[in-house]
Amino acid sequence: MGTTYSEVTLRSFENGHKPYVAQFLVDTGAIDCVVPASKLVEAGVQRVGQQLYELADGRQVVFDYGLVRIEVMGKITAGRVVFGPENAEPILGVVALESMVLKVNPVTQELEKIAASLLK
């Protein structure tokens, strides 16, 4: 599989802050979204907790996370975003992707809207 990118807008739940807008790597192997910590601070995102994460190289690291409004392709959800290292590439994780009823087309490598959510 190739790589898929999409423009993502993250908005703080605190009023008066400019949203963070960037091209995110769509990573179906990542649970949560990741953004460099300074960008989240600029966007007014508050740290609300910590979580232990396992990285691709097998290391386990504790990161702070916050809660944001996530917008992709006209779809909106709310979810967790990790205050990542400053050199972190912005990542759109699978929880946000699935909650917006989006998927990666394995042939075109593009995001697609799914017709309906499953409730069964």
Image (tube, helix red, strand yellow):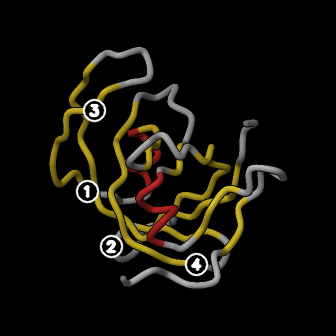
Whether residues under marks 3 and 2 lie with C-beta atoms below 8 angstroms apart, the answer is no
Which residue sits at x=31%, y=27%? 54
From the image, tell me which residue sits under label 3. Answer: 53
Query: Few, some or many C-alpha atoms within 10 Å of disc 4 (few <14, some 14-19, many ≥20)?
Result: few
Above-or-below relation of 79 to 88: below
User: Closer to the N terminus: mark 4 or mark 1?
Assistant: 1
User: Closer to the N terminus: mark 2 or mark 4?
Assistant: 2
User: Residue 13: which numbered mark, if any?
Assistant: 2
Indicate the amino acid at tag 3: Tyr
The residue lying toward the viewer, choosing from 98 and 41, is 98
**Residue at far front of view:** 120
As helix, strand or loop, the secondary structure at mark 3 comes to strand
Foreground tag (3 vs 2): 3
User: Residue 46: which numbered mark, if any?
Assistant: 1
Distance from the alpha carbon under mark 2 to that under mark 4? 17 Å
From the image, tell me which residue sits under label 4. Answer: 75
Q: Is residue 13 left or right of residue 52?
A: right
Distance from the alpha carbon under mark 3 to that under mark 1? 19 Å
